[in-house]
Image (cartoon, rainbow, N blue to C red):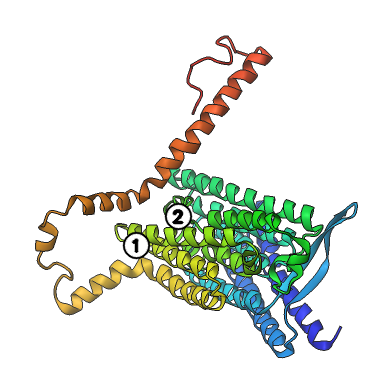
Amino acid sequence: MTGGTSLLHGAVLVMFLAPASLLGLLAIPSLLRRPPQERVVASATRIAMVVAFAAALLALATYLAAGTGPQVLSYGAWFSLGTGRFAFDFLVDGRSLGFAVLSTGICGVVAAFSRRYLHLEAGFNRYFVQFAMFVLGITLVALAGSIEVLFAGWELIGLSSALLVGFFHERRAPVVNALRVFAVYRVSDAAMLGAAVLLHHWAGSGSLSLLFSGQGQAELALHGNQAVAIALLLLGAVAGKSALLPFSGWLPRAMEGPTPSSAVYYGALSIHAGCLLLLRAEPLLAQSPAARVVAALLGAATALYATLTARVQSDVKSALAYASLTQVGIIIVEIALGLTGVAFIHMLGHACFRVLQFLSAPNVLHDLHELENLVGGHIGQGSHGALAARPSRRAGTLYLVALERGFVDALIDRAIVAPFYGLVGRLDRLDRWLSGGGGADGPDSDSEGTP
């Protein structure tokens, strides 16, 4: 192993260990009911994020200086089972390390903002435990060299996201919305798990270099319909995590969480995690014209839907979330068209811009009032003649569809959730009838079984 390779190995390992150590340092005392003080939490988070960001910069500089192309860095295996080996590998290239630099940098900024935003909040330590979980997850997703590492990071992002949506659990709405978000993420995770199983079954390995290298290795391992099936499953995982149609309904529900978590999840990083996965799997899409067409149509439909919906939102965070979704849809279209360089730059620029908007959202009204004081009057209170005009029937219908967010939640509830609850109710009554525990009405009873 050369000096440059050793330095790259070490920097990537430190980049992973910094958030992992932070998670252990904050989570273990919390589990023992002895959470650390605010200043300890803040100091530990600041040190971990500085170390992770410095390691990411060093890894990127070392990789670019070496000019050796994509590399798989192996750090052993999770475990072995028979002839199968579940590897703990990182696949490093310019995109993975570039996204890692972006992630650690943005997370460092959001951590500093969160310290002040949540000062003296009862859940201060709990927030940073979940934040550390997210940083570790996004690092694993960015650097994943095996499907096992990717799935672990994918799970950490989803779990921390759902927990932060329900952060203010003393109110009912955040808990209900967190469960809805978690349910959608389960669908996304099921698609990811399906892709992992099929990759192991058909390729005999969980190495993502088969999918992400773009150097012809995938063609040797996957053929025709196999590549299409894995590509479609990955696209399903991306749709759930990045709120693409038909899963967009969870996005406004996620705004129940604290503003800093909304910034890092739905403005900057989490919503782009699916874009990164699809971007790195673009060589697989090249083998799957059908999946490429589906991705393009899905991205275009999501961008149009989010554009219409964002224009009628009455709160800043939801408007920004749908504005982010518009750009995510466009990025998906760019990837489907093979414009990978444009998509990557678009993703980096949009993440930086949107996190700034989310972090400044709480000050919007304050800034507006300050501006009105300076100009000596109200802004935007001119003639209402245009508003008084009666809109056309077509415009009114379009406005209603946008206002109701495309009726996405209602359609899913009626087409999927209600039949599922009905099936569960019938199975429950059948179980009670078979066990003799109260099935007097029989398994085909018409009594209501849904909650």
Relative horizontal placement of residue 391, taking residue 397 as reference (left or right): left
Relative horizontal placement of residue 448, taking residue 12 as reference (left or right): left
- Observer-side mark, 2 or 1, equals 2
Residue to which mark 1 is pinned: 316
Percent across and percent down for residue 146 are: 75, 63
Percent across and percent down for residue 15 are: 69, 74
Residue 159, compared with residue 296, is above or below; it is above
Percent across and percent down for residue 225 are: 68, 54
Q: Residue furthest top?
A: 440
Which amino acid is tagged 2? Leu
Q: Which residue is located at x 61 percent, y 55 percent?
A: 232
Residue 417, compared with residue 447, is above or below; it is below
- For numbered disc 2, what is the local secondary structure? helix
Q: Residue furthest bottom?
A: 65
Residue to which mark 2 is pinned: 251
Image disc number at residue 302: none
Give the CA distance from mark 2 to mark 1.
13 Å
- For numbered disc 1, what is the local secondary structure? helix
Q: Earlier in the sequence, mark 2 or mark 1?
A: 2
Q: Which residue is located at x 16 percent, y 54 percent?
A: 391
Which of these two is toward me, 369 or 275? 275
Which amino acid is tagged 1? Val
